[in-house]
Image (spheres, rainbow, N blue to C red):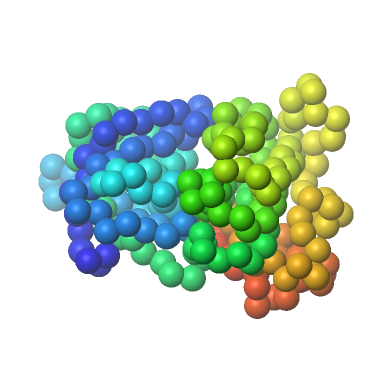
Amino acid sequence: MAGHWRVATVAAHRPETPTARTLVLRVPDWPGHLAGQHVDVRLTAEDGYTAQRSYSLAAPAAGDLIEVTVQRVPDGEVSPYLVEVADVGDQIEIRGPLGGWFVWRPDDPTPVVLVAGGAGIVPLMSMVRTRRMARAKALFRLLYSLRSPAERYYSTELGSHQAGDGGLDVFLAYTREAPEEVTRPPHRLALSEINTHGLPPDFAPTCFVCGPTGFVESAANALVALGHDPRRIKTERFGPSGGRP
């Protein structure tokens, strides 16, 4: 059941940025999950003190293996351990999968626009990976706003098309520092870029927007201004507390 706590064992981990890494967790009898869902992670100290945070699942399940990508939050109670300390063989508690609204199903042929700000790429990457694995045909447009190349998650996967990526286009919007080969000057994701690199409202796409609160509000307002149906815009926000994604 999604509501009870399970013991998960760290099976592997890999860095994504200097302050973020992906944990591969082995969870016996994992029931599977939808792209966009999340889990609660709970840590218990020797004195019995517990702390928990929510983290988006970063990929479809591979049997009893799941993935979460965690950004370290200064002075956080959970993320510093997951990013800097947790090692293969260590155990943590998780609860999930959770969430049923901010999700994408590979049997849905509706076109999709994904707009990510920073760590908000995590649940949207799960959608990209699920689409790839299922060889789904829905049109996908991903707009990923990030500060600099050093903060780019999943750089290998998002750097080139892979098998199953036909119909997926990726636009990277650097806001503070861009690679030398990128001619676009660093600036915030603009309405004109959402218009150019997204999909037209006539396609009636489902739009998923994830990132910090200010970014999500700005991107969602831009989509509405471009004529997208507000009922087809799904948002997920995160704040300084270290919660999801």
Is residue 92 among the parts visible in the rendering? no
Residue 152 sits in which quadrant?
top right
Q: Tell me where residue 33 appears, x and y as whole percent.
A: 37, 58
**Residue with the most extreme top position:** 180
Q: Residue drawn 84% across and 35% down?
A: 184
x 57%, y 29%: residue: 156
Tell me where residue 60 appears, x and y as whole percent: 41, 49
Give the camera-side residue of 28 and 13.
28
Name the residue rendered at 30%, 60% in the picture.
Answer: 96
Residue 24 in sight: yes
Residue 181 lies left or right of residue 71; in this view the side is right
Dividing the picture into quadrants, the one containing residue 210 is bottom right
Give the answer, above or below, for where 175 lies relative to 105.
Answer: above
Quadrant for the N terminus, please. bottom left
Judge whether 204 appears above or below 171 on screen.
below
Using residue 138 as the reference point, say whether residue 71 is left or right of it.
left
State the image coordinates of residue 224 (x, y, percent, origin top left): 77, 71
Q: Position of residue 21 (x, y in %)?
A: 43, 34
* Outermost left residue: 47
Q: Nearer the viewer, residue 93 or 85?
A: 93
In the displayed structure, 152 sits above or below 167; it is above
Please give the name of the residue rendered at 65% of the width and 73% of the height, measured from the top-left corner. 232
Task: Count the labels in the image.
Answer: 0
